[in-house]
Image (cartoon, rainbow, N blue to C red):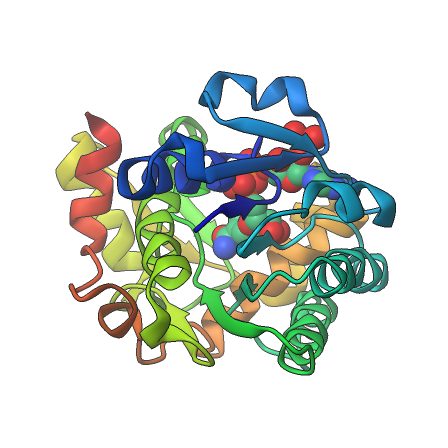
Amino acid sequence: MKVAVTSASGQLGQAIVKNLIKEIGKQNVVGIARTPEKAKHLGVEIRKGDYNNRSDFNDSLQGIDAVLLISGMDEPQKRIEQHRNVISAAQQNGVSKIVYTSIVGDEFHTAFSPIVQSNRQTEKDIQNSNMQWVIGRNGIYIEPDLEYLDTYIKDGEIRNCAAQGKCGYTSRTELAHAYTHMLLDEKHNNYIYNLLGTAISQQELATLMNQVYKTQLVFNSMSVEDYAVERKQELGEFIGGVIAGIYEGIRNGVYDIPSDYEQATGRAHKSTMELLQHFKR
Ligand SMILES: NC(=O)c1ccc[n+]([C@@H]2O[C@H](COP(=O)([O-])OP(=O)(O)OC[C@H]3O[C@@H](n4cnc5c(N)ncnc54)[C@H](OP(=O)(O)O)[C@@H]3O)[C@@H](O)[C@H]2O)c1
């Protein structure tokens, strides 16, 4: 069985390629990347694949049995068409199974909703294809919070608009483990899995960080409106709005949902404490 992973130069793609090599050997794994030189170090065959370029995928999906489509990063409407390039090229090449990294999120009420909607459209496109499919809806990564730790320490606080809302964090490592199972085991075919850990509040996140990193962070909540203004000033209109929308989703309980992680992998999702300890190493 030959398995291809798109966006293989990205952090999630690399983690999945590495897991697949352990399971099926490097000769059976193909990395597809917009920038192939960024994925060469993985030691598998790397083929060219820019989501904007359908003909890239007509070539790169030849001889592939299963493909993992990692969601693109462009603005929502563009993503739908980019993903369709991969889906239709996969069908044309006789790929028998497609697995898609979608997201958990509120489809209607936040500034993040257009991105969630675009992911749901791709889910429909995949379900309407003639391939076997598996869809994972990823929870929020913990990594950005850890990359932001120095800022939290400087400010002495985690500050956002999540209020008492809880979020089931995940990590790229946990997701890579799940997608490897979802690609290789037929029993997952035609399932949609929510891939996230047990939900915790921002106050609980601050407490866990304090335990692991010996910090003294507190959590301070602010209004959705004020947080959106702050994020847009720092990150620009689009990304700032998206981040504020994600935290508004946490506030509204969107990421406090049952997880299917154990069904996808055969083991429980790691706790947020375990994720934090893993990154400290
Ligand atoms: N759940 C969360 O909290 C969360 C957080 C961040 C991102 N995400 C999502 O997770 C997915 C990947 O995450 P990641 O950690 O791997 O991100 P990453 O490390 O930033 O990698 C992004 C990847 O997307 C590729 N890419 C961008 N535009 C492309 C295009 N037009 N055609 C083909 N590939 C393209 C990049 O290729 P190059 O190397 O050529 O640039 C890179 O491989 C994305 O779907 C993103 O939306 C989720």
User: Residue 4: percent from the left, percent from the top?
Assistant: 54, 45
Q: Is residue 36 above or below residue 200?
A: above
Q: Quadrant of residue 79?
A: bottom right
Q: Nearer the viewer, residue 40 or 269?
A: 40
Q: Which residue: 41% across, 42% down?
A: 16
Q: Which residue: 28% across, 36% down?
A: 22
Q: Is residue 75 left or right of residue 244?
A: right
User: Residue 148: percent from the left, percent from the top?
Assistant: 45, 34
Q: Is residue 257 left or right of residue 263?
A: right
Q: Is residue 259 above or below residue 66?
A: below
Q: Is residue 174 above or below residue 117?
A: above
Q: Is residue 105 left or right of residue 148?
A: right
Q: Nearer the viewer, residue 143 or 56?
A: 56
Q: Is residue 227 visible?
A: no
Q: Quadrant of ligand 1?
A: top right
User: Residue 107: percent from the left, percent from the top?
Assistant: 65, 79
Q: Is residue 211 visible?
A: yes
> Which image quarter is the C terminus in?
top left
Q: Nearer the viewer, residue 153 or 86?
A: 86
Q: Which residue: 70% across, 48% down?
A: 73
Tag count? 0
Q: Is residue 24 left or right of residue 234?
A: left
Q: Which residue: 23% across, 41% down?
A: 276
User: Residue 91: percent from the left, percent from the top?
Assistant: 71, 65
